[in-house]
Amino acid sequence: MADDIHGALREAIRTILPDVECVLGWGSGPDPLRSAPLFMKSPEDVERFRAGELAVNNLAVFLPEYAGRKVGIVVKGCDSRSVVQLISETLVKREEVVIIGYPCRGVVDVAKIAAAIGLGNEDLEAGLVERAEVNGDTVSVTVRGETKTFPFKDVMAAKCSICRYPNAVLHDVFIGEKAEAREDSYADLEKYEAMSLEERFRFWEKEMERCIRCYACRNACPLCVCRDHCVASSREPHWLSQADSTRDKLFFQLIHATHLAGRCTGCGECARACPVGIPVGLFKRFINRAAGQLFGFQGGLDPEAVSPLQRFLVDEPTIKEKEWK
Amino acid sequence: MRIGVFVCHCGSNIAATVDSAAVAAAARDFDEVVFSTDTMYTCSEPGQTGIIEAIKTHALDGVVVAACSPRMHEPTFRRAVERAGVNRYMVEMANIREHVSWIGKDKEANTNKATELVRMAVEKLRLNRPLFPKTFKATRRVLVIGGGVAGIQTALDCAEAGLEVVMVERESTIGGKMAKLDKTFPTVDCSSCILGPKMVDVAQHPNITLYASAEVEAVSGFVGNFEVTIRKKVTCVDWEKCTGCGLCTEKCPSKKAYNRFDEGVGPTTAINIPFPQAIPKKAVIDKEFCRYFTTGKCGVCAKICPTGAINYEQQEELAQEKVGAIVAATGYDLFDWRAYGEYGAGRYPDVISSLQYERMLSASGPTGGHIKRPSDGKEPKTVVFIQCVGSRDASIGRPYCSGFCCMYTAKQAILTKDHIPDSQSYVFYMDIRAPGKAYDEFTRRAMEEYGAQYVRGRVALIYPKGDKLVVRGTDTLMSSQVEVEADLVVLAAGAEAARNASGLAEKLHISYDTYGFFVEGHPKLRPVETNTAGVFLAGACQGPKDIPSSVAQGSAAAAKVLGLLSKDVLESDPQIAQVTLQRCIGCGKCIRVCPFQAIRETDFRGQRKAEVIEAVCQGCGLCNATCPQGAIQLSHFTDNQVLAEVEALCRC
Ligand SMILES: Cc1cc2nc3c(=O)[nH]c(=O)nc-3n(C[C@H](O)[C@H](O)[C@H](O)COP(=O)(O)OP(=O)(O)OC[C@H]3O[C@@H](n4cnc5c(N)ncnc54)[C@H](O)[C@@H]3O)c2cc1C
Ligand code: SF4
Ligand code: SF4
Ligand code: SF4
Ligand code: SF4
């Protein structure tokens, strides 16, 4: 990402700092490749701020905790949709958040890079990556003194190649020229839909076998606001047993997906957070497409909108029930 | 828990395809079941006694009845266990009739399925808890919406029995369609002579408050305690002052206003009183035609009115009424026959609707009871009636029979002969439907005594020829083409739901069918109830109905209201939503999704939480299904109860 944008972003953050409790952004993480959330309270903190292709996390996940206090947040396009969805659900108040947007050309998929250098995601111990740099269209990573360079598009997150909203859909400040939107035809789902139900079930059973029930997927989701009250760990109601069974694990994914129906903005954090690489985002992709087809609705675009499954209408405008024969 | 299971034979209804004894035997192995048996008719007196005795002998604290639909007999069994001292919510039903015996013939499969359903019911029951209704005070007043003959009947019956009645009618007078009719079948007595006195009674009854030119704007609350907002439309006349003298209508210079009461047969004045017997007899200005509004100058009526009632600046007003029950009696409207291109789609002036013809026949109507062709005012000699216009025609989305058209067409054919003795009537019909008392005799009289020519078949085309209309159709009995040169064609337009009936249904939270007619609680056993407690139906709003049936329903609805409000206190259903405060994170999803606005946000020690307004909750369960962490649970249908049923089923 260009230095002038970084500079302008830092300037914008500094400008709002006096008005807010803190500004959420990114700083360096366990190693140069990975970013970590940065909670900026002072101008010195702002020096450590970085955005761009390595700014992967969706910081909207922290917003509901700040209810009642005013905060700033720096957002990519996808992050901004989470903020919008939270506002539309009254979980975040518009007047309590200052949104700073910038054009996003995509972020890296750390798991893809790890795989390209012949490592598993779980092998990426802190400090292993010595250097990471994005130069125009390439990404260079240095591990154990050896530098490897990849075309950015090869290691870009899958969600970014189909991103329709690379610029913040809602913002108070926007720094830089708007990035170009891409198209999403849900082509990735075709492969799974071609499977028979039986095959699909086997596929998921196999995937879910790896699940360690860490609930990182849930905790990373900015819209999973139940936190400690999640049904996954309650007896009253008792939706899931604590048994180490694949079916219970799969059931949790289905619960997560249905709870996100008509709300999920496709930020991809759930799948990214999974330490064992289960493609849990697919469930939500499937339901997101259905919400679009059925209700003409996508989450996180309009702060005034109410998700179709979060309201009661006698007649859904897109479902002409009375004309059914 | 000590559970008893009773498996019904329902005579042979169940036993023919389900081995009830085997189901009972299998149930003995289920957890906590200490007694099970099969009975011939569980709902019968001995059947219920059997349950009560078993409860006493085996110290049961829960009962599963495997029989018919709970919609049928759940109340029966709840009362039975209550008589034995067990809480009424400690009963579960497994529907092994509608869900099993009636839909499958394979006895072995049916028996297995019945056993599974019983297992589910047992698992659910194990998590049931005694529930207790709360009592609340009911408002002993009733709202009647629609002042047709059905609504009038309801209002009078209720008022006579001592209830206060609020009637809301959207036109400026009550009377509905019946007020527009000349004579009524099958006795051919004068419509306004029999309706008029009832209308006067409505006006004069001390217990009835009438809002005419008004509509229901909003309804909130629940059975026993509805809050109704009534929108009084702008009439530009202060009805407190208007005496109905009619001077204004005599002097109004705008004499070409559309006459709604006369269905457009003959014009009226911009300020008008629909008909001499109107109740209330008050003038209304039609702004579309009033010169004061169209040209800004006039004010004749304001000058002439002896009481100074005219108020061009009048604004809409809202009124509030509290009632305990609501009766919808909004009737029907006529199908717009212009949908039929083959009948001229409204282009030929001498093709008119049956209701327009009624106005022509009426001595107090626009033609003074003379039948005249709209085109040239001549008396027609050949009159063709076409039945089923907009009825029994799936191609225009009206597959149902309107019920009364066969009868009124026969009536109109008879009256035509009375008015014009040298006339000849032809009636094109599909079938004659005259099943009421003295009805078939009546249609026969039209044919035999009054010489009306009945032709069985549909009309394919009407086209003008000189000053006549050629009606071309097929006689399906003779298999021949028929052509009649008619002076006047009367279309028996079918009935459809009253304008915007669906909108009202939504305000009342009642269901309506594809055609907009309101849906009764049960087609046979709850004909005037709806599935919303405290809301009842009367007359043609539930489906096309003639006057005798509408009046009968009007009285039936009144009886239901009187029964309901005979007590000052009503019991609330405890099957409602409840919030577990510790679990609720105050996300507000339940608040947004509740169709009855039964949940509000509260502050609990500084935290945002949801709270159910118990009396308003209808127990629909939407909030329960929406709350992601299950913090709001529907009593008697908690997640755990439903999950237990699913588990039981998956275990089989
Ligand atoms: C041409 C013709 C001839 C007929 N002849 C006979 C006959 O001879 N004998 C016979 O038995 N039957 C006859 N009928 C049938 C008869 O008209 C009906 O049976 C009867 O009118 C039904 O009464 P009702 O009160 O249910 O409905 P309606 O008469 O339709 O009255 C409903 C009332 O509710 C009002 N309303 C509607 N919506 C609202 C609203 N949202 N808010 C407030 N008010 C509202 C309407 O303005 C109306 O006043 C004839 C019908 C037709 C079309
Ligand atoms: S479910 Fe996954 S993709 Fe959807 S909003 Fe949550 S984290 Fe983002
Ligand atoms: S993040 Fe992955 S492993 Fe953890 S609970 Fe979710 S699916 Fe299972
Ligand atoms: S949906 Fe559940 S958690 Fe949210 S406010 Fe309602 S009861 Fe509370
Ligand atoms: S069950 Fe829930 S959604 Fe339904 S009426 Fe009651 S509070 Fe409202």
Image: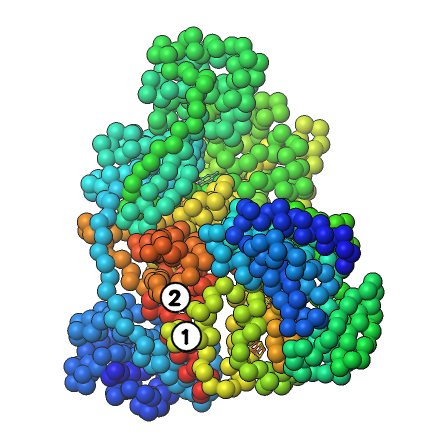
Q: Residues within 10 Å of mark 1 (few under 14, many from 20)?
A: some
Residue A202 screen position, x and y as percent: 63, 85
Residue B583 - label: 2
For the N terminus of chain B, the image quarter is bottom left
The residue that appears at 54% across and 61% down in the rendered structure is A62
Side of A115 relative to B415 (left or right): right
Q: Does mark 2 have its CB less than 8 Å from ligand 4?
A: yes
| Chain of the residue under label 1 | A
Return the residue nearer the eye: B87 or B271: B87
What kind of residue is marked 2? Arg
Judged from the image, the secondary structure of the residue bearing numbered disc 1 is loop
Q: Distance between the residues labelled 1 and 2?
A: 10 Å
Q: Is residue A258 visible?
A: yes
Q: Which of B184 and B69 is in front in this view?
A: B69
Count of numbered marks? 2
- Residue at image point 59% right, 23% down: B378
From the viewer's perspective, is A105 left or right of B95? right
Q: Nearer the viewer, residue A301 or B148?
A: A301
Residue B260: image location, x then y, percent: 50, 29
**Hey, which quadrant is residue B276 in on the image?**
top left
Marker disc for residue A234:
1
| x 19%, y 49%: residue | B568
Q: Quadrant of the C terminus of chain B?
A: bottom left
Q: For the residues labelled 1 and 2, say whether their Cβ atoms are less than 8 Å apart.
A: yes
The amino acid on which the numbered mark 1 sits, given as a three-letter code, is Ser
